[in-house]
Image (tube, helix red, strand yellow):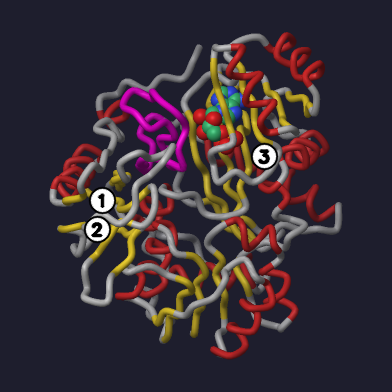
Amino acid sequence: MRVLLLGGGGREHALALGLAADPAVQTLIAAPGNPGIAALADIRDVVAADPGAVAALAVETGVDLVVVGPEAPLVAGVADAVRAKGIPVFGPSAEAARLEGSKTFAKDVMTAAGVPTAGAYTCTDADSVAAALDAFGAPYVVKNDGLAAGKGVVVTDDRASAEEHARECGRVVIEEYLAGPEVSLFVVTDGEAAVPLLPAQDFKRVGDGDTGPNTGGMGAYAPLPWAPPGLVDEVMRDVVHPTLAEMRRRGTPFAGLLYVGLAITASGPRVIEFNARFGDPETQVVLALLETPLAGLLHAAATGTLADHPPLRWRDGAAVTVVVAAEGYPATPRAGDVIAGADRPGVIHAGTRRDADGTLRSAGGRVLCGTATGSDLAAARDAAYELVRGIELAGSHHRTDIAAAAVEGRITIPA
Ligand code: AMP
């Protein structure tokens, strides 16, 4: 199989590791890639969110499968353009990617499908914002109603900050606050058949103890020792299959990766959000545990043959990833700093670039992810932090509590 992978972050480095390890993959091409991916794939330059350019590259390189990593190309219609050339693509159509691209659309689909989620209002002016904030009370949840790379959400007890975020965004979705631990569940689907991956948890806030602003994600672990038995089956039954059925009913089936972000509340799992692609950094830990060849799985989803795919096989144990972020991330990340200690197995490149002389430099907010597996969560966590300790990057910061509460048995579901 010849595979073209689109994107250049940590998620795509993790996908590249999985694809390159699949014995069915003879050639892996990545665009635009990054220095970590360059060790596994031929790198091509393309504007990943330009449907015509990506389709032309897929034709030129004669690939059998295109895997779209990030959300922006999906919302721009890259999967449609590639599919129109008769090339299988793992990633939903632009219409279906609206499950991520518009919070209002996602709420409409959930309501029609009877999916348990937070109550919400879409607001466009100060009066409707005030009414919605009054209706739900604190803590206030205010979401930009468009793609915001995971950073368009403000959760706060401070009324003025909630109103200010709403003003800045223009069109927002204001939601009921959902209390309970969060779960990220990735589901591979061809639009009809659906296969869940292992549930994972990520860490959105920049600081230890879930303090500071939201980020793209500062670390993750899988599986979840505290998850209620039957959680995945319940989410497949009550969330995933009804949502896929509603998307088919609308004539816009969702095929690709449905990312279900959930809060496990006192009344059961509630959807916080859908994404239309693998999450970053949960992909790093979930794929580290997947034994089933990745390209075969994604190809089955891309060709509508997922129902015939054998059950997934998983490695025993657990995986942890810890993000090393640039100074100033998330507000004003500094780029261009020299990195040492990154060229080791398990160090995933998220925001890096390499000079002509081979020097590795930071080139993004989230720079590297120390990713390790272990016989249990505690061992995986120790190994991930050992990797992080070996990384040198001036001014960088990372959370020190990734997976700590789970290891210590401190995660509880509200009664
Ligand atoms: P989102 O981009 O929708 O995933 O939101 C980012 C983060 O904000 C989530 O991972 C949650 O931690 C938090 N969040 C979003 N919606 C809610 C909600 N309704 N209740 C509580 N927390 C939320």
Residue for badge 2: 346
The mark closer to the camera, 3 or 2, is 2
Residue drawn at point x = 42 percent, y = 59 percent: 9
Q: Which mark is residue 370?
A: 1
Confirm or deny contact between disc 3 and disc 2 (CB under 8 A): no
* Percent of width and height locating residue 66: 57, 75
| Mark 3 element type | helix
| Mark 2 element type | loop
Vertical side of 322 occupied by 308: above or below: below
Magenta stretch? 200-226
Ligand 1 closer than 8 Å to label 3 CB:
no
Of residue 67 and residue 308, the one placed in the foreground of this image is 67
Q: Residues within 10 Å of mark 1 (few under 14, many from 20)?
A: many
Of residue 156 and residue 234, the one placed in the foreground of this image is 156
* Percent of width and height locating residue 202: 42, 38
| Distance from Cα at disc 3 to Cα at disc 2 | 33 Å
Q: Amino acid at mark 2?
A: Gly
Residue drawn at point x = 83 percent, y = 37 percent: 112
Confirm or deny contact between disc 1 and disc 2 (CB under 8 A): yes
Q: Residues within 10 Å of mark 2 (few under 14, many from 20)?
A: many
* Percent of width and height locating residue 104: 76, 37
Q: Amino acid at mark 3?
A: Val
Q: Quadrant of ligand 1?
A: top right
Q: Amino acid at mark 1?
A: Gly
Vertical side of 4 occupied by 13: above or below: above
Q: Left or right of 175: which side holds 62?
A: left
Question: Visible in this render: residue 375?
Answer: no
Residue drawn at point x = 32 percent, y = 69 percent: 35
Vertical side of 345 occupied by 208: above or below: above
Residue for badge 3: 239
